[in-house]
Amino acid sequence: MQKVRYALIAGASGLVGSHCLDLLLKSDRYSQVISIGRRDLPLLHPKLEQRVVDFNKLQQYAAELAVDDVFCCLGTTIKKAGSKEAFYKVDHTYVVDLAKVTAAKGASQFIVISALGADASSMFFYNKVKGEMERDVQQAGFEAVHILRPSLLLGERTEQRTGEEVAFKLMKPLSGLMIGPLKKYKPIEAETVARAMLYVAAQQQKGTHIYPSDDIAALGAKL
């Protein structure tokens, strides 16, 4: 009989995170889901525990973050964050701090949303930050790290992201032509990414696994 597990999700108010939380609450695999954020979500569920945290002081909440699987959907944009420094704090520091704290408390898996093109040696700031995050998360001490690198995310956002809307309008007519090596650049539904997160977590494969966007689409269809 499979052990019922405890899950933690960070970033549940976001585009992928909201879908991920919904799937976690519906999943028989998890008996309890802890959602951490800067404020409570307008949601009640018997399996859900919400904890308001200061991400700058995550270590203070370590005792409350003992789970099996961690689903990290934290992320912002430079425009929304207000500066490169603030963006780095959300997309790198908070993610890595979460990994370190939960690994120390015994979590076995860390499933995180990165981005297409993530590369710690990139000359592009965004890609470099994502790459450094991936590198540092892998050093936290988990049995398994699953890194998902989706292309342009599709779905209804609570906030407007003009740059992404423009990119989608430019890429949509070309989407059908993105085959073969170009498949990983095809826009992908946020719900599909969330489904892929739960799917890879359920496989319980040890080690580090990195999934480009076309693999994410295939895995998301399996859940």
Image (cartoon, grey):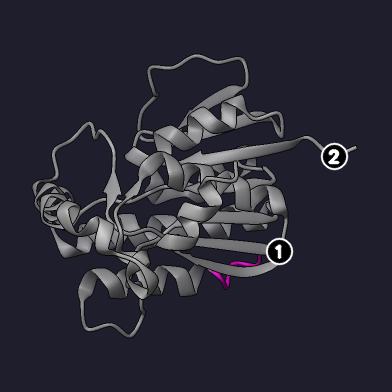
Regarding residue 98, the answer to whether it shows in the image is: no
Helix or strand or loop: what does disc 2 sit on? loop
Depth check, front residue: 40 or 170? 170
Where residue 64 appears, as percent x and y from the top left, is 61, 37
Would you name the residue on which mark 1 appears?
A: 143
x then y, percent, for residue 135: 47, 75
Tell whether 185 sits left or right of 159: right
Residue at the image position 44 percent from the left and 34 percent from the top: 19
Over which residues does the magenta segment extend? Answer: 138-143
Q: Quadrant of the N terminus?
A: top right
Q: Is residue 80 left or right of residue 217?
A: left
Relative side of 123 to 131, left or right: left
**Residue underneath mark 2:** 2
Of 113 and 183, nearer the camera is 183
Chief secondary structure of the magenta portion: loop
First-in-chain label (1 vs 2): 2
Left or right placement of residue 173 versus residue 9 in this view: left
Q: Is residue 158 visible?
A: yes
Q: Amino acid at mark 1?
A: Glu
Marks 1 and 2 sit apart, C-alpha to C-alpha, by 18 Å
Q: Count of labels shown?
A: 2
Labels 1 & 2 near each other (Cβ < 8 A): no
Q: Report the residue at 62% width, 53% height from top.
A: 200
Q: Amino acid at mark 2?
A: Gln
Residue drawn 32% across and 54% down?
Answer: 90
- Compare residues 166 and 158 and report the one nearer the observer: 166
Q: Quadrant of residue 170?
A: bottom left
